[in-house]
Amino acid sequence: MKVLVIGKGGREHALCWKLKQSKRVREVYCAPGNAGTHFDGIQNVQIEMNDTRGLIQFAKREGIDLTVVGPEEPLTLGIVDAFMKEGLRVFGPRRDAAELEGSKVFAKELMRQAGIPTADYRLFRSAPDAEHYVLSRDVSLLIRSKGRSTLRHPLLCRTASEAMEAIDRIMDPREMLSPNVTVEVEERGVRVGFATAAEAKDYVLERPVGLVLKADGLASGKGVYVCDNIKEALAAIDKVMVRRIFGKAGDRLIIEERLDGQETSILAFTDGRTIVTLETSQDHKRAFDFDKGPNTGGMGAYSPAEIVTPELMAQVESEILVPVVHALKRARRPYRGVLYAGIMLTNQGPKVLEFNVRFGDPECQAVLMRLQSDLFDALEAVVDERLDEIELKWDKRPAVTVVMASEGYPGPYERGRVINNLEEANAMKDVKVFHAGTTLRTDPSLGRDDRAVTDGGRVLNVTALGDTFVEAKARAYEAAASIRFTGSWYRRDIADRAIQTAASKVPV
Ligand code: AMP
Ligand code: GLY
């Protein structure tokens, strides 16, 4: 069989690497691929992932037996529909099913209809409506005037809007110069005084609210704002709906309740009739150690997610996976491919944060490292709608993936930095270095394209297996430490949560 993988990240490198291990696969192509796929004997094809016509032409010319789509963007643009129309076999959901990731509004409405547990939400089509909603959140403040006789009694203000109005009443602009008028804001017995209306209002806007704002459309993972206070929520509305930093993706906005708990990623294959879950995993979205700093595309991952017990997995299957596959089928958008449920394990049980219509990145790297079954057989069974014949075998040992990033990421960064010692790291036992943001550059001494240079914010996904999480982590970090490129950095605490969970399970 000849297989084509579309994409150029660490996920696609891992898919290529695993597919190449299949006895049934003769040749693996990757469009456009990266330096890592090239080093692994995969044929990189210089066609970009959204060039559907170019990809179809290539698949026909080369007689590709199966195409696997890595990223969400081509899926939401309908690449699977286009391939199928040409009679080409392709792994991934069609466009109308890929809406599950392409539109958060669609996903939320589907979940609501199907009774799938998820955060309560409201939908907004305009910035003023969204702002009004945020300013109407319960803050419960007591506003008092000091030094002004007309407003002697404290005003109980339920919402931020009411509090701001009260401040305006006390701090009449005409009395601004009156030095002895101040406003006092009381929250649960704590009183704070302010000499100006602006300061008092600022304080009101800093009151905590647990809101999460989400741009409807695709925003390369950056369209979600977990807001601690009103000010942050207003700033997010401004970015998405006023400045429109994601363009049309920000036409609609979801505001939902913030959930508390541990997150986990559950991936499952489905052909629309059968669901086969993969081993659990967990990524680390924040840039810095101890989950500090901005959200990123993922700074590391581990598998399995020890907090997901078999009982919990059964609950996720019956309350989330089965209903969503069924709901899509009933909506005449049958789903075929890999389904990714981002889940928060709350006190009230598992709730869906998001659905993705592809493998998680970097979760895929850790999960595939543990897959012992033939990946080609599994993907083919999904495409041919005979997934019921497949049983997946897994390495019991845990896997840890450490993301090595470019200096400056997730902000601006430079590309083109030479990466050294890749071979040594790759040669280590139970280690695989997947490439994410790399490309090839001509090595002058060899006269051919044989040097890996950085070409993205997240550069490498150093993945290791170990008998325990402690061992897998140590191995991954040992390999990462041996790889050199200028400005490289990585989180130091990948998998620590799993190590703690594992430790707490040991009987005393
Ligand atoms: P999403 O792209 O929807 O997964 O959102 C990205 C990240 O935002 C998630 O992985 C969570 O960490 C966080 N998040 C999304 N929705 C919520 C929510 N309702 N409550 C708390 N955190 C959330
Ligand atoms: N690791 C998160 C994602 O793939 O969306």
Image (cartoon, rainbow, N blue to C red):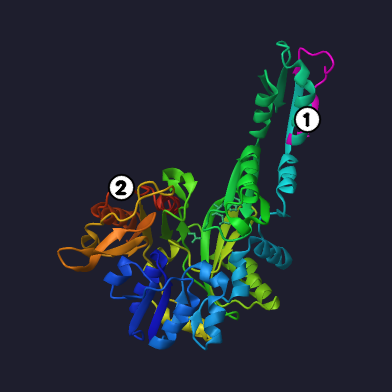
Nearer to me, 406 or 494: 406
Q: Earlier in the sequence, mark 1 or mark 2?
A: 1
Q: Is residue 90 left or right of residue 175?
A: left
On screen, residue 382 above or below 349: below
Residue 391 spot, x, y in % from top left:
47, 80
Between 208 and 98, the one lying in front of the other is: 98
Residue 78 point in image, percent of width and height: 57, 75
Tag 1: amino acid:
Glu
Q: Examine the image and state in which quarter residue 132 appears.
A: top right
Give left or right: position of 5 versus 158.
left
- Say what amino acid the circle numbered 2 marks: Gly
* Residue at 22% over, 57% down: 420
> Is residue 402 shown to the viewer in this render?
no
**Proximity of marks 1 and 2: CB atoms separated by less than 8 Å:** no
Q: Using the image as rendered, state which of residue 52 and residue 81 is in the foreground.
A: 52
Q: Position of residue 219 (x, y in %)?
A: 55, 57
Is residue 159 a member of the stretch shown in magenta?
yes
Tell me where the magenta segment starts and ends, as one range: 145-160
- 3D distance between C-alphas at marks 1 and 2: 50 Å
Q: Which mark is residue 165?
A: 1
Residue located at (67% from left, 19% from top): 193
Q: Mark 2: which secondary structure?
A: loop
User: Does the closest atom of ligand 2 sit within 8 Å of the Cβ of label 2?
Assistant: no
